[in-house]
Image (tube, rainbow, N blue to C red):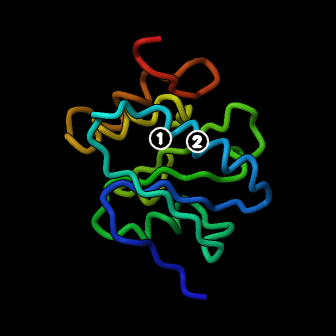
Amino acid sequence: MARTLPDGESLLVRTDFTDDAAWAETLAAVIAAYDEDTMTELTPVDDVALDGLSPAELADLAGDRTYVFLAGTTTMTDPEHPLLAVDTGTDGEPVFRIAPVAVAEVEVNFLLADMDFEDYADSVDDDGVFRGFDR
């Protein structure tokens, strides 16, 4: 199977297929983070061909996108389901983890180019997860 990513500005890519219930919980939490009038371009990608894809491999597939959100093993096994924000301009080096409840805040600011990876990476909690500025 060829590994490709669909069109879309913001992608949430599932790379771990060991727990469908955890993926459903994660996706529901991410969707709930958006207000009904919030602009979003987030596209969930649930394609088993992407199973085990590393952040660097994801960056290679990203094309001209500057970021991708990755739902990997940590997302599926951690009760909070933190996603990995991948800066595709740095060879797929992840910059920070993000709680599903904060995805809307990050994604919208990335879309508008209001903030960058360093702004969020500098604002993670002690465990390395960004949970929002207004908590």
Q: Please provide percent x and percent y for residue 3.
A: 53, 80
Above or below, 58 relative to 86? below
Answer above or below: position of 51 versus 127. below
Q: CA distance from mark 1 to mark 2?
A: 24 Å
Q: Residue beneath label 1, please?
A: 95
Which amino acid type is marked by label 1? Val
Camera-side residue of 127 and 7:
7
> Do residues under tags 1 and 2 come within 8 Å of each other at their CB atoms?
no
Residue 32 placement (x, y as % from top left): 50, 34
Q: Label 1: how many residues lie within 10 Å, few (<14), some (14-19) or many (20+)? A: some
Q: Is residue 31 left or right of residue 52?
A: left
Taking depth in this image into account, of 22 and 35 the one nearest to the observer is 35
| Residue at the image position 60 percent from the left and 63 percent from the top | 54
Taking the view exactly as shown, the residue that stands out farthest to the front is 36
Which of the two discs, 1 and 2, labels the residue nearer the N terminus?
A: 2
Q: Quadrant of the N terminus?
A: bottom right
Residue 25, image quadrant: top right
Residue at image position (34%, 34%) is 36
Identify the residue shown where x is 71% and y is 44%: 74
| Relative to 112, residue 105 above or below | above
Taking the view exactly as shown, the residue that stands out farthest to the top is 135
Residue count near mark 2 (Cα–Cα under 10 Å), binned few <14, some 14–19, many ≥20: few
Amino acid carrying label 2: it is: Ala
Judge whether 35 appears above or below 112 on screen: above
* Image location (x, y in percent) of residue 13: 53, 59
Mark 2, residue position: 28
Q: Nearer the viewer, mark 1 or mark 2?
A: 2
